[in-house]
Image (cartoon, coloured by chain):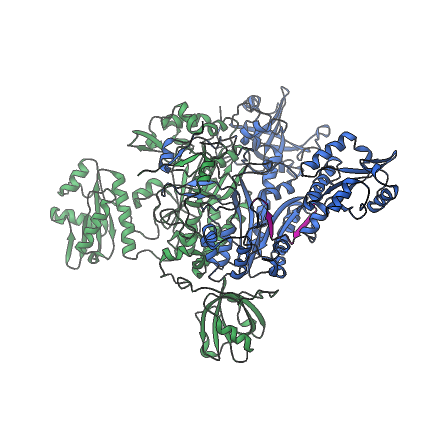
Chain colours: A blue, B green
C-alpha cells in the first residue's frame, strides 16, 4: 500500500513554484489537500508548509501512476515528480500563490495513507475543542503555521538584537524554590528529599538579579514561566517571557532605550513598520486621561474633567459628590448620540457598575434636541456651559461618572471608553499605538492588610527625588518602573532595582517587614546584596502577547503549538492525568480525597 | 556612604582598554579586585566581565577622591573616571590583557560597598560546596564567566545555522503527561484537577514528531529536559537539549548531514577548528575494536582478537573459554610494560571485574624478559605466535580477557583501554576525535523480562533491508539510528522514525505489546500516525556536554549558571524546600512520613 522514499528528494516546496519553474522537472512532497477526479484527468492540490500547488495527472501518464492517483484520498502524504507548465488562461487562480502554474504529474509515490480526518483541515469553523484534541491536524492550517513561523522569526530577531548589544543568554533553573509572594507556584515534589518541593519559576527575577551581582553585566533569555492561577481568557499556565537585565545603569532611560530598540527592530523586520520613537506618559496622566495604566491610544475619547463646570449645578448627584471632594468626569462619544437607545444606555449603566461606579449620567445633542438623564435638573446656563466645555456638537453624547473615589471614577470611564470604541468600531485596523507608561506609584495601600505594600516588588527602586518621603508619605513616592503598552495591551514592564542596602532597609520598613520576615521570605537573596551589587535594572516582555499583536490575533492559543485550555488541561495528550501509585510512593506523597 | 551614578556612563569595559586609549579620558565601572595602598599612591585592579584594569590614584588627585580611594575594600563596586597612560617599562604586566596601560584616576564613585566575601573571588581552591552556596560570587570568576559566554555563543551559532536551513523554532510544553517508559518523571500536581499530575518533559520527542505530522516540516528547539534519576557525576536533573526533527527524509544521511553541519559550524566559529568530514563507524565495529558505542578515538590501543592464536594453548582458562565458544581478546599497552607493578596489575584485575570480567591475564616483554600471568602454561611456540600476532616489542604488554560473553569481553577491555590511556597520559590535549556511530541494533534482549525490547524507543525505524527479520530474527535487525561521539563522549543521537503503520505494528508485535498496552502507553500519539504521517527523523544533542567539550572542562557545573549538586539540591537557594501546608491543601496532596 505504501512506498518509501528510496532516495528520492524534494526539489522544491509547493508554495515556491512559480512561472520561473515552467518547463522544469521538479519533485514536491506533501499532503493531498483537495482532489477532483474527472476520469481522464485527476486534479490534486498538494500542501506543504509554504502553500499549495495544483497537480494534474492526465491520460498521458503511465497506467500504474494513474491507478495510484485514483486511489488518493484527502491527507494522504505523497511525492510527485513532474514538469511545471503554465495553466491555460481560464484556469488561472489569482487567489492562489501558485495559481498561474500547475505540475503535470509523471511519477507518484504514496508515502503514507490517512484515515478521514475528524474535521476539514484548515476549517476554523470546526469546533475549537475538537481542533485542540487533534492539534496535530489543526497545525496543518495555514494561519496557525504562519503564526508559529512568525513567532520563530520574532525570537530570532530578538536574539540577534541582544547579541549585537552585548547581552549574554543565560539559562536560569526551572527547579527552584517556592517564594511566598506573588501568584501561586506550581510545585514539584522531590524524591531524593521526601516532603520537600521545588517550584517552577514565575519569572527569572531573582536569578537575573543574582547574575548582575555575579558580574554578568548584560543578560537576556527567552524563558518559560509558570503561574498556577485560575485562567482568564488569553492566559496560559505556562507562558514565555523575553527577559533582560543590565548593570551599571541607574536611570530608567538606559533600560528603556535598549528595550525600545528591540521592539522597533521586531516591528521593522516582521511587519516592515517603523514605530518611530516611543512617547512616554506618566502613570498619573494615563489614569487621568484614559482611566488605565495600559491605555489604548489608537483612538481619542479622553476623559474630561467636568467637576469645575458642574459646581453647584443643581443636580444633586453631582453636587453631593463635589461637596464631598469627589469627582465628576466624563467622556464624549462623537456622532453616535442617536445610536444609543435607552436600552443601550441602561446597559452602559450596568457596565460601569461592574467597575464599582454608582451610576452613569448622559448628556447628548441630537437632531431632536437634548437627550440627557439629568438635563432637567440643570439651568440652561449650566447646560450651555457643559456643552461649551466639552465642545459638544449635534450627534455627540457625553457619558459622565460622579464618584467620591478617584480611581473608581477614571477606571470605570476608561473601561467605558474601550467598550464604546469597540461597539462603534472606532479602532483603526493595522495601526500600532505604542507608549511607555512611567512614574508608577512605588506603593499601594492594602485595605485588607491595613498597610502599604510594594506595587511591583520590594526591590523596585524609588525615584531619587522621592527618597525623602518613603517613610513619611509613601503614597507620594514614585518608582523607577516602566511598562510598554501597545494598543491597550501591556507588552512588558520592568524597573530599576534597589542596590543600596540603606534604601532597601527603608523600603522594607515602609512596608512593615521585620528582619525575621525579610529573612524568611527573601533570605539568601537579600544576603547576596551585601557583597558588592552594581546598579542594575531590567525588563521583561510577554512573548505570547507580542506574537498576538504581530499576528493580529486575539486568541493566545493561535500563537502556541500545543496550548492548554482554560482549565489548564491539554485536550490532545490529556495532561494532567492520574499516575501510577508507585510514582507517588517514590515521592512520598499521597492524594487527599475530599468526599 | 554610597553614591549613585547620577547620569555618569561607562565609556568602555575594563578589559578592552589598550594602547589605543592612551591620553583619552574614560570611565570604567566594576569591582575592586585588588588594592595596594602605598600612602601617596593607591593601586587598584578594577574587574568587569571583560577583564581587569589597573587604576592608580596618585598625589595629584583631589583630596576627597584620595580619601574615598583609601576607604575602598575588595569587591566594592566603583566607577572611575581618569586618563589612560602607558605603564612605565618595569611595571608592564605581560600576564594581563591590559598590562601595558593603566588608568590614572581622577574621579571615583563608590556605587556599592561589600562585606568581606566568604572566599577569595576567582579562587578555585576554595571548596566547591562553599562556592556553590555563594554562586553569585563564584560567578565573578573569569573562567566561569567565559564558559557562560561561550555557552551563549554556541546557542547563537546553533540558532543561526538552523534558521539558515529553514528550521522553525517551536516551543513545546513543559506541563505534559507522564509516560510509563523511560526514566523517572518529575511530577507536578494539578490544583484544578485534584489527584492528577503533569510531568515535566524528559525530551520533546513526542511533540516534535507531532509537529512533523502537523506539517511543520523542519523543527528545532534548544529545550530544557528533566529526569528524576539518581545523579551520577556530570548529570543534572534539568539539562538542555539541542533538538531537531525534519520531514520528507527517510535516509539517515539526510539528518546526519544537517546535524554534522551544525557541529562543524560550532567548532569553526567557537574554536576556529575545522573538524573535516565526520567518519562513520558501525556499532559492531565500535564494540569489536573499542568495546564501546562511544569510543574515544584520540588514541589507538584497539582491541585485538587473540582466540585464533590461543587455540589449544595449554592455558586452561583460554582453552575452556574457547571450547565453550567464548572469546579471548586483548589490548596492547606500548612501552609501559615496566611501569605496571604487580600491585598495579592486581588493581587492573579488580578494575575489569567491575565490568563483569572474571579476570585479566597479561603478557609483556621487558628488558628482563617475559612478564606474564600465564606464560608458564604456554609452549615457546605459542608464546612466539602471540608476540608475532600482537606485534609485541620490548616494553609492550598485552592485557587479555577471556569470557564466554562477547559483550563482557569487549566492554571490560574497552574500559581498561580508557583507564590505561588516562593513567599513562596517552590522550593528546586540544584534539577532537569525532565519529558517527551507525547501524545500532534495533532490539536488545531483556533477561529480566525474557523478551526483546526496543534499544532506542519503539518508534525507531528498522533498516529497510532488515524488515524481513523483525519477527523471525530480532537480534539481527539494525536501526536507522545514529549517535555522534566526540572524544569518547556521546554528544547526541537520533533516528529515523517509523511512519508506516504496518511497520509500526510489526515493531509492537516484536516487543510483545498488545493493542491494549499500546493504547495505554502511547494512546493519542499512535493514533496521530493514522492521519497522514510524512517520513521523518531527527536528532538531539546534549548542549551541556557540547559546552563541556568546547570549554575544555570535565565538570558540568562549570557550564551552568545555577547548577544543582548530586543530590539534586541547589546549595544557593536551598531548593527543594518545605512549603506551606496551605499550598499542599490547595493541591490536595499530603506528605507520607515513613518513620
Observer-nearest of A523 and A103: A523
Tally of numbered discs: 0
- Residue A429 visible (yes or no): no
Answer above or below: position of A117 versus A562. above
Instruction: Tell me residue B80's x, y (percent).
Output: 54, 70
Image point 32% across, 44% down: which residue?
B292
In the image, residue A443 lies in the stretch drawn in magenta: yes
* Image quarter of the C terminus of chain A: top left
Q: Is residue A25 left or right of residue B264?
A: right
Instruction: Tell me residue B378's x, y (percent).
Output: 13, 46
Q: Is residue A112 left or right of residue A368?
A: left
Observer-nearest of A392 and A131: A392
Answer above or below: position of A318 versus B477. below
Observer-nearest of B474 and A571: A571
Instruction: Tell me residue A562's x, y (percent).
Output: 53, 35
Answer above or below: position of A471 versus B59. above
Q: Quadrant of residue A40?
A: top right
Q: Is residue B307 left or right of residue B438?
A: left
Instruction: Tell me residue B570's x, y (percent).
Output: 41, 50
- Residue B44 visible (yes or no): yes
User: Which residue is situated farthest in the top direction here?
Assistant: A39
Q: Is residue A153 left or right of residue A412?
A: left
| Span highlighted in magenta in the image | A432-448
Answer above or below: position of B378 versus B587. below
In the image, residue B353 lies in the stretch drawn in magenta: no
Amino acid at each position: 500500500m505504501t512506498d518509501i522514499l528510496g532516495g528520492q528528494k524534494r526539489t522544491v516546496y509547493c508554495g515556491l513554484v512559480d512561472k520561473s519553474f515552467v518547463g522544469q522537472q521538479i519533485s514536491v512532497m506533501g499532503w493531498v489537500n483537495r482532489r477532483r477526479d474527472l476520469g481522464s484527468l485527476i486534479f490534486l492540490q498538494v500542501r506543504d508548509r509554504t502553500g499549495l500547488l495544483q497537480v494534474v495527472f492526465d491520460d498521458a501518464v503511465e497506467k500504474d501512476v494513474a491507478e495510484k492517483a485514483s486511489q488518493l484520498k484527502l491527507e494522504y502524504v505523497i511525492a510527485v515528480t513532474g514538469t511545471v507548465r503554465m495553466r491555460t488562461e481560464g484556469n488561472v487562480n489569482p487567489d492562489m500563490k501558485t495559481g498561474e502554474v500547475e505540475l503535470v504529474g509523471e511519477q507518484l509515490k504514496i508515502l503514507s495513507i490517512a484515515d478521514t480526518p475528524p474535521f476539514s483541515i484548515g476549517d476554523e469553523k470546526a469546533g475549537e475543542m475538537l481542533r485542540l484534541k487533534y492539534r496535530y491536524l489543526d497545525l496543518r492550517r495555514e494561519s496557525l503555521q504562519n503564526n508559529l513561523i512568525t513567532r520563530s522569526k520574532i525570537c530570532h530577531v530578538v536574539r540577534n538584537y541582544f547579541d549585537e548589544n552585548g547581552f549574554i543568554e543565560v539559562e536560569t533553573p526551572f527547579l527552584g524554590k517556592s517564594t511566598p509572594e506573588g501568584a501561586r507556584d506550581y510545585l514539584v515534589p522531590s524524591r531524593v528529599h521526601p516532603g520537600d518541593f521545588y517550584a517552577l519559576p514565575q519569572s527569572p527575577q531573582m536569578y537575573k538579579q543574582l547574575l548582575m551581582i555575579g558580574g554578568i553585566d548584560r543578560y537576556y533569555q527567552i524563558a518559560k514561566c509558570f503561574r498556577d492561577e485560575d485562567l482568564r481568557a488569553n492566559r496560559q499556565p505556562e507562558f514565555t517571557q523575553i527577559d533582560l537585565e543590565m548593570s551599571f545603569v541607574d536611570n530608567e532611560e538606559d533600560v528603556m532605550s535598549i528595550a525600545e530598540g528591540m521592539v522597533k527592530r521586531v516591528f521593522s523586520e516582521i511587519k516592515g513598520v517603523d514605530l518611530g520613537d516611543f512617547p512616554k506618559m506618566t502613570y498619573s496622566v494615563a489614569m487621568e486621561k484614559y482611566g488605565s495604566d495600559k491605555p489604548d491610544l489608537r483612538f481619542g475619547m479622553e476623559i474630561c474633567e467636568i467637576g469645575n463646570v458642574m459646581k453647584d449645578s443643581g443636580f444633586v448627584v453631582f453636587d453631593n459628590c463635589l461637596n464631598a471632594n469627589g469627582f465628576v468626569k466624563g467622556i464624549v462619544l462623537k456622532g453616535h448620540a442617536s445610536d444609543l437607545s435607552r436600552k443601550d444606555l441602561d446597559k452602559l449603566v450596568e457596565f460601569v457598575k461592574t467597575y464599582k461606579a454608582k451610576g452613569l449620567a448622559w448628556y447628548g445633542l441630537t437632531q431632536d434636541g437634548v437627550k440627557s438623564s439629568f438635563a432637567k435638573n440643570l439651568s440652561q446656563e449650566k447646560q450651555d456651559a457643559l456643552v461649551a466645555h466639552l465642545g459638544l456638537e449635534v450627534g455627540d453624547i457625553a457619558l459622565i461618572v460622579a464618584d467620591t473615589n478617584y480611581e473608581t471614577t477614571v477606571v470605570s470611564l476608561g473601561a467605558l471608553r474601550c467598550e464604546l470604541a469597540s461597539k462603534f468600531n472606532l479602532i483603526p485596523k493595522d495601526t500600532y499605538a505604542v507608549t511607555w507608561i512611567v512614574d508608577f506609584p512605588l506603593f499601594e495601600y492594602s485595605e485588607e492588610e491595613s498597610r502599604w505594600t510594594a506595587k511591583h516588588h520590594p526591590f523596585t527602586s524609588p525615584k531619587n527625588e522621592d527618597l525623602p518621603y518613603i517613610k513619611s508619605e509613601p503614597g507620594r513616592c514614585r518608582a523607577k518602573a516602566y511598562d510598554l503598552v501597545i494598543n491597550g495591551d501591556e507588552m512588558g514592564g520592568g524597573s530599576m532595582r534597589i542596590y543600596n542596602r540603606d534604601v532597601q532597609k527603608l523600603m522594607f520598613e515602609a512596608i512593615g517587614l521585620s528582619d525575621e520576615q525579610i529573612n524568611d521570605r527573601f533570605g539568601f537573596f537579600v544576603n547576596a546584596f551585601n557583597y558588592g551589587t552594581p546598579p542594575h535594572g531590567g525588563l521583561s516582555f510577554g512573548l505570547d502577547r507580542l506574537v498576538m499583536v504581530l499576528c493580529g490575533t486575539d486568541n493566545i492559543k493561535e500563537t502556541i503549538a500545543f496550548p492548554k485550555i482554560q482549565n489548564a488541561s491539554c485536550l490532545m495528550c490529556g495532561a494532567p492525568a492520574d499516575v501510577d501509585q508507585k510514582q507517588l510512593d517514590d515521592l512520598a506523597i499521597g492524594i487527599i480525597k475530599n468526599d
